[in-house]
Image: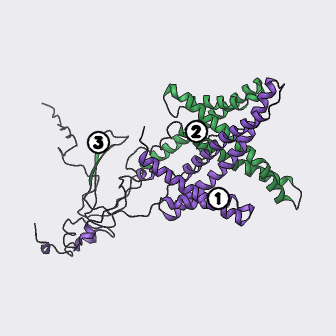
Amino acid sequence: VQIQSNPNLFRIQSQVPSSSTRRSRCSISVLLLYQSCSASQAQLSLLRAPIMASPSPPRPDERDTDLPLPSPPRKPYPGFILDDAGGGFLIGGGVGSAYHAARGLLGSSSGHRLAGAARAVRANAPRISATWAARCGLYGAFKCALSLPRATDGDPVVSVLAAGAAGAAHCLRRGPLAVGRGALVGAASMAVIERADAALDNLRSWVHYHRRLVPEEDIDGGGGSDPKPDDEPPIGFLGVPPKPVVVEEVPAG
Amino acid sequence: MADPRLFPSGSNSSGDASGPGRRKYNPYHDLSTPYSYQTLYDLPTSPEFLFQEESAAQRRSWGENLTYYTGVGYLSGAVAGAALGLRDAAAGAEPGDTAKIRANRVLNSCGGGGRRLGNRLGVIGLMYAGMESAMVAARDRDDWVNSVAAGLGTGALFRAANGPRSAAVAGAIGGVLAGAAMAGKQLAKRYVPAI
């Protein structure tokens, strides 16, 4: 039984490092307003770049916010059909080649193991990669079709239904019983994958949130006349609502 | 305008002791440094982004590049192969065939042809995407040289098993096709109006 896998789950994305330093010729003062999860009051942060200084100080690697970074949005319609087909081709070809190479290595007699592995890969890898590319392409097409009336992206119900439809379409020539079985297997596999994806996302958010709870050590060190960045601005500062005046009630009598 | 000589560049040396690699901001420091006009107007032409992920989102990462080009290659090859298979099925039709036999022949020809050509073009897209991403990472630039070099490498690698002469011809064809595709893309971006 072939288990259909979500190609996005195994995608490894890394950013291309850019070592070019850009020189800023003007003074940049940026007011960043953001809200933290624990306290709902607005905090203020000032970023200032020196005038005509080269190289400029490095920009922050992550946005300074308590929430975890949102995952990049998916491709617009119908671009992700190509992406899904490509992912299926890559994963099917990679996993299929590894599996059949191992099987050829173990199944051949001594002295012919490498030749047996090469022969097995050449015989089976095109079939498996084409099968998985077709399945994932069908899955992307059905997901595109099912997402249109609901107008939502990333809906797990749409994903499960699309996987079931893709499994059914893939088994059309083998009869109605195979169609039903393919639909059930596809839908169940995608349900498991969606649940695993949601669990991974929750784990990532939990780790990110709990990392933010650890207090950061003071970068400025001890003393110094520099005002600390988390000093509260004075009352009435532009953009910050004034604090409520707290009056202590003295009991009469 | 204050006289720059009133604030020499060494006046903030006592303030530098606050931390290693960190100095206080002195707005008069750059006024005393002599600048030429070329230095003043040497501005960068690339867009400046406030956050790192904005600059990273301007192009696909290497993983997205890999899946996208592989998908484009496989699906275009599958459609072209299916069309060729349909032509072969029409040519191979015999009088007296039943509808079931005719449908079976059409499905077999389209499926076989689509799979074969789809696999071939998918592998070509995979090699091209990998080489282009490697060139971008190695050169740290994103221009037409990367595409042409990736096309050359893809063609040469695709025909490497057939001998050096066939590999050289295939590499040349790959480079020319990649350059033509890049030029076509630039012309389309410039002259085809956005719908």
Which lettered chain is shown in purple?
Answer: B
In the image: residue B25, left or right of residue B106: left
Q: Could you tell me how far apart the alpha carbons at marks 3 and 2 are, in whole angstroms?
A: 42 Å
Which mark's residue is nearer the viewer, 3 or 2? Answer: 2
How many marks are shown on the rendered structure?
Answer: 3
Look at label 2 and name its amino acid.
Ile
Q: What residue does disc 1 label?
A: B155
Q: Residue at x 83, y 54 (%)?
A: A106
Query: Which disc, if any, is residue A81?
Result: 2
> Circle 3: is it few (<14), some (14-19), or many (20+) Cα within 10 Å?
few
Question: SS class of the residue under badge 2?
Answer: helix
x then y, percent, for residue B17: 27, 72
Q: What residue does disc 3 label?
A: A42
Q: Could you tell me how far apart the alpha carbons at marks 1 and 3 are, in whole angstroms?
A: 57 Å
Have a look at marks 1 and 3 and say if they share a chain: no
Shown colour of chain A: green
